[in-house]
Amino acid sequence: MNVLLHYFMKQLEQAEKNIFLDIDKDKWRAGYHLMPPTGWLNDPNGLCMYQGEYHVFFQYSPFDAEGGLKFWGHYKSKDMIHWEYMGVPLFSDQPFDIHGVYSGSALIENEKMYLYYTGNVKLEGDFDYTNTGREPYTILVESNNGIHFGTKKCILTPKDYPKGLTLHIRDPKVWKENDIYYMVLGARAKPDKGEVLLYCSYDKINWELKNILTTEQNFGYMWECPDLFELEGKKILSVSPQGLQQQQRNYQNIHQSGYFLLKGDMTNQYTLENFTEWDKGFDFYAPQTFLDNKGRRILIAWAGIPDEKGYDNPTVKNGWQHMLTMPRELKYKNGKIYQMPIKEIEQLRTQQIAIENNMKVVPSFELEYDNKSGQSFDIEIDNDVVIAFHKQQKYFEISFKGALGSGRKSRSVTLEQCQNIKIFADKSILEIYLNAGEEVFTTRFYPQNDKVMLYYHCDTKYCKMWQMNRYTIGRNVV
Ligand code: FRU
């Protein structure tokens, strides 16, 4: 065995020794969101359904709650409610991925799982790591059981990418369409333009550049984590652009995530239209989608954001940071994508709770409000988090009055009408769905006590609330 791999495996065994045992000792550990067993998590990777099971890989730095060397961690599940933690299938143990097994995706074919990812290499020396000193490799690794992976194969090296780009090229998403394999890679063109490289292949190994997908006007300097898929016959290009300027209620975070409608032929003449943000909350980035065996297009994102200086996550002092969003089913309606948590999440509802003002509950609940009158309303948590629809001024806002946001202040969206709202609270995360998924806000929050106080300024006879159960998470490290 490679010496480095051996070393990492030993370290990991040590780091993960007591995971899952102390969940009740940390009031911010979530019940129905996937988290790093220990340390740091970022992007979801390799999302797929394989031999009847859902697989969720993720960017994982088990040794450092503030990030660091990235590996892939792995969860799998038959029903997206009972999960098994499978350990780390991909460590950075090769010269071409020595500074990180970066993000990527899965392709399933003939009972095999193919994972594509970016091997990150940073040379030692005085470099800017944008135009010099960085080497992105595209790597393929195969598996016959979705658990053990074979030899890593380098399929694109830095000299294979087109001219005119910086060295920020990464995050392969691969799929098959009409007997051709396609791959999109996120890129930063020189000097500062976000783009997506579209490749095609007939054998999954040799790839040819087909097109460059971008906007006419600059739209951010870098596009990370691209995904290209079809929904109700429409082609959707999802990207996470960096460098957009805030415009009123749009692009309020440091980096964004959203989608374009791709009109025309992706391999030839096309246009990218109507960029729409996936989520307007404080903590959302790098989503990836996959198709399951029920034909659902499911999205999972990192409920976090890179490079943010204004707010943080106090879980770091407890040895971990970040989580993934719940899986969301996507539907295309009236020129827009609607997102709702997958139906399976309803299985986690336990007893229904009668609504009363100033009641105390464990912050692990689903709350829905049917805004029959269409009027303004607000719901407050611990006299700090304010979740409010303002009918006259036509906007919805989540804001923090005090310390629960750990630096988070306000995020909002222009909204003519708010007919309904669903709030999923899970210990230290809120996912808020408006108008049956027309707008979504994902935001971390940090209650001081085991229970929170809820205050409703709305017609509570149209409110329903359930206490939520947890995912079952087992450990099956092989
Ligand atoms: C997005 C990202 C990806 C990269 C990964 C590294 O959050 O920066 O572009 O592959 O994270 O962890």
Image (cartoon, rainbow, N blue to C red):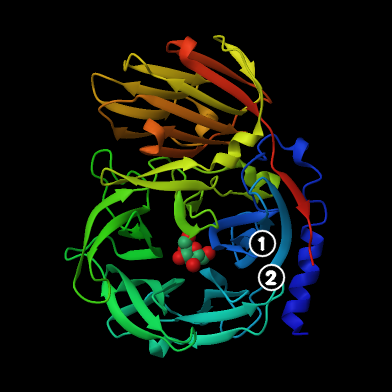
Q: In the rendered structure, are the residues bearing label 2 and label 1 in contact, judged by CB atoms less than 8 Å apart? A: yes
Task: Determine whether, in the image, residue 270 is placed left or right of residue 201.
Answer: left
The answer to whether residue 387 of the structure is visible from this angle is yes
To which residue does mark 1 refer? 74
Q: Amino acid at mark 2?
A: Pro
**322 to 410, vertically: above or below:** below
Q: Quadrant of the C terminus?
A: bottom right
To which residue does mark 2 refer? 89
Task: Determine whether, in the image, residue 458 is placed left or right of residue 348.
Answer: left
Q: Quadrant of the N terminus?
A: bottom right
- Mark on residue 194? none
The answer to whether residue 131 of the structure is visible from this angle is no
Judged from the image, the secondary structure of the residue bearing numbered disc 2 is strand
Q: Amino acid at mark 1?
A: His
At label 1, counting other C-alpha atoms closer than 10 Å, the crowd grade (few under 14, some 14-19, many 20 or more) is many
Q: Quadrant of residue 464?
A: top right
